[in-house]
Amino acid sequence: RIQILFEVIMADSTSVFLLMINGQIESASFPLYDDLYCRMCIAYGTDWALVSGLEEGTSQIARKTTDRNQLFVWNFPIEVTLKSTNPHGWPRLVISVFGIDAFGRDVVRGYGSVLFPLTPGTHKLKIPMFVPESTSILQKFTSWLLGTRPEFIDHKFVAQNDGREVTRVRSQGCVTISCNIITKDLANAGFCVTSPFRTITT
C-alpha cells in the first residue's frame, strides 16, 4: 500500500519528497487531575500538503491508572503522509489536553508542541505541557467563577512564533508519544539526513 501511494505521487514530479508519520499519543502525566482527553492537530508550512490521513483528532476520556505512575493512557493513533518541495515549515504535532472541572465544564489542562523528528526511524518523545495564566489574582478568580479560564482560540498558536513573547504561561504535566518516521526522495531534493538504527528518546 505504501509503495503504491509513493509511486502515484512521485510519477509527475521528482522534486517532491514525502514524509510518512505513523505512531500514537501514548500517555500523559497530570497528577492533580482526572478524566482527561486530548486533541491533536498537525501544523506545517505553506509549502507542505496533506496526502493522506487525518491532521486533527480527539481521543477518548481516560482516567488515571491506579499504580504509582498515575498515567492517563490514550494510545491515540497518528497516521499521516505529507509532501513538500521545501523542508521549511517541517510538520509539528500540537496537543491540547482538556478535563472537566467541579462544575462539569470543559477546561484546558495543557498545551504542547513538538517538531516531528527529521531522521527516519523509531522515536519516543516527551512533550512538556503548559497552560495560559491570567495576569492578576482578580482575573484568576473571575475566570474561575465564570468558567472562562484563559485558553487559546487557535490551538495551533503554540506552534507559531508570533505573539508568544507576550503570553504568560505555567508549566503543567507532560505527554509521551511514539512515532515511526519514513522519508522518500529527500536526498533527491538536495537534503541529507542520517538514519538512526536505535530508538531515540528526547
Image: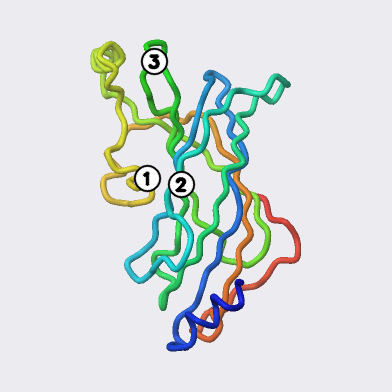
Q: Earlier in the sequence, mark 1 or mark 2?
A: 2
Total number of numbered discs in the rendering: 3
Tell me what residue is drawn at x 49 percent, y 84 percent: 10
Percent coordinates x, y for residue 37 in the rendering: 49, 31
Residue contact at pointers 1 and 2, CB within 8 angstroms: yes
Q: In which quadrant of the rendered image does the N terminus lie?
A: bottom right
Q: Amino acid at mark 2?
A: Ser
Q: Amino acid at mark 3?
A: Gly
Q: Is residue 130 above or below residue 145?
A: below
Q: Earlier in the sequence, mark 1 or mark 3?
A: 3
Q: Which residue is mark 3?
A: 104
Percent coordinates x, y for residue 150 in the rendering: 30, 27
Q: Is residue 126 above or below residue 87?
A: above
3D distance between C-alphas at marks 1 and 2: 6 Å
Q: Which residue is mark 1?
A: 158
Q: Earlier in the sequence, mark 3 or mark 2?
A: 3
Tell me what residue is drawn at x 45 percent, y 55 percent: 54
Mark drawn on residue 113: 2
